[in-house]
Amino acid sequence: MAEASRSNAPWLLSGPGLVLFAALLGTPLILTVILSFYQFDYSIGGIKPAFSFENYRDVLTDPYFHKIFGRTFGVSLIVTVFCVLIGAPEAYILNRMRNPWKSLFLLVVIGPLLISVIVRTLGWALLFGGQGGISTVLQWLGIVDEPVSLMFTMTGMTIALVHVLVPFMVLAVWASLQRLDPQVEDAALSLGASQATVLRRIVLPQIMPGILSGSLIVFSLTASAFATPSIIGGRRMKVVSTTAYDEYLSTLNWPLGAAIAIVLLIATAIIIMSYNRLIERRYARVFE
């Protein structure tokens, strides 16, 4: 009896949290799935609770939605790559610093997380405008002859998203670096290995779990980002989240907006699970 109680203890302790999680996340998700199968009657401008796959057929067959989903996942991939290239070296350099510089620069890196995404994005909007700081500096340096605007462009949206999400990559790699013993690097250097060899053969394999987990976080957050694409990308560079928002509030076609959101959720989940599966197989071959 005592053994049974001990085996059930984890479930009993986590039960309240699981119930709260299911209520706050599961219920809205189920309601969204149900809504996605409803129909929207344009003649009356209302929702008809009639079961239909019409919304999913529109999303999966219309080239307009194909272009939006392609742009969304393309931007997510590009932002993830840039976050890896910036965040991993940044985390390594921070880890090699000594106090108080380490604490100071770590605060600088993660400090933007304390500021609203909207505020940071509006700051980039001021810089990206035709009369913004970037355009002014380029004209002053003589690189361009007339104002240049990065607003409503893929480049501007990518830069803003990288700035917003790179701290997540830094934190993920930082967590992996905490398990790396600096004496291992010193031992390799004392045995004649170059710094490049140490980074490639010792440091990189150790921080790879952090890079992989950070990549998943950045990719999923970019695919579902709304504030930054809506402000920087605008109507010209619509992504899935802004398209679903427009269907909800502009055309009032809630069922279609729900279907778009569910397709995004399923597509992102498939990509993440496939990515995990690929990495697991690769690591399994390495350690066999």
Image (spheres, grey):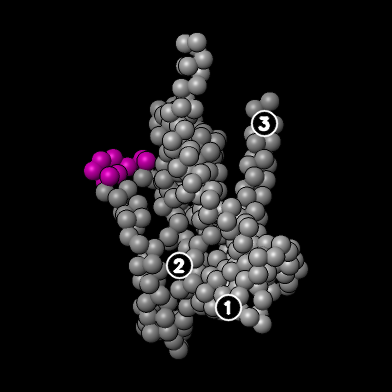
Residue 102 part of the magenta segment: yes
Residue 137 in picture, x, y percent from top left: 37, 79
Which residue sits at x=69%, y=36%?
Answer: 281
Asked which secondary structure carries label 1, the reply is loop
Of the residues shown, which amino acid type is indicated by label 2? Ala
Residue 161 visible in the shown view: yes
Label ID, residue 201: none
Asked which secondary structure carries label 2, the reply is helix
| Contact between labelled residues 3 and 1, with CB atoms less than 8 Å apart | no
Q: Which residue is mark 1?
A: 251
Q: Which residue is mark 2?
A: 227
Residue 262 visible in the shown view: no
Q: Residues under labels 2 and 3: Cα distance?
A: 39 Å
Indicate the quadrant where residue 223 lies.
bottom right
Residue 221 in picture, x, y percent from top left: 51, 56
Q: Is residue 33 left or right of residue 123?
A: right
Residue 206 part of the magenta segment: no
* Between discs 2 and 3, the one toward the N terminus: 2
Residue range of the region highlighted in magenta in the rendering? 95-103
In the image, residue 133 sits, relative to residue 165, either above or below, namely: below
Q: Residues under labels 1 and 3: Cα distance?
A: 49 Å
Q: Which residue is mark 3?
A: 284
Indicate the quadrant where residue 186 lies.
top left
* Between discs 1 and 3, the one toward the N terminus: 1
Of the residues shown, which amino acid type is indicated by label 3? Ala
Foreground: disc 1 or disc 3 = 1
Is the residue marked by circle 1 packed among few (<14), some (14-19), or many (20+) residues within 10 Å?
few
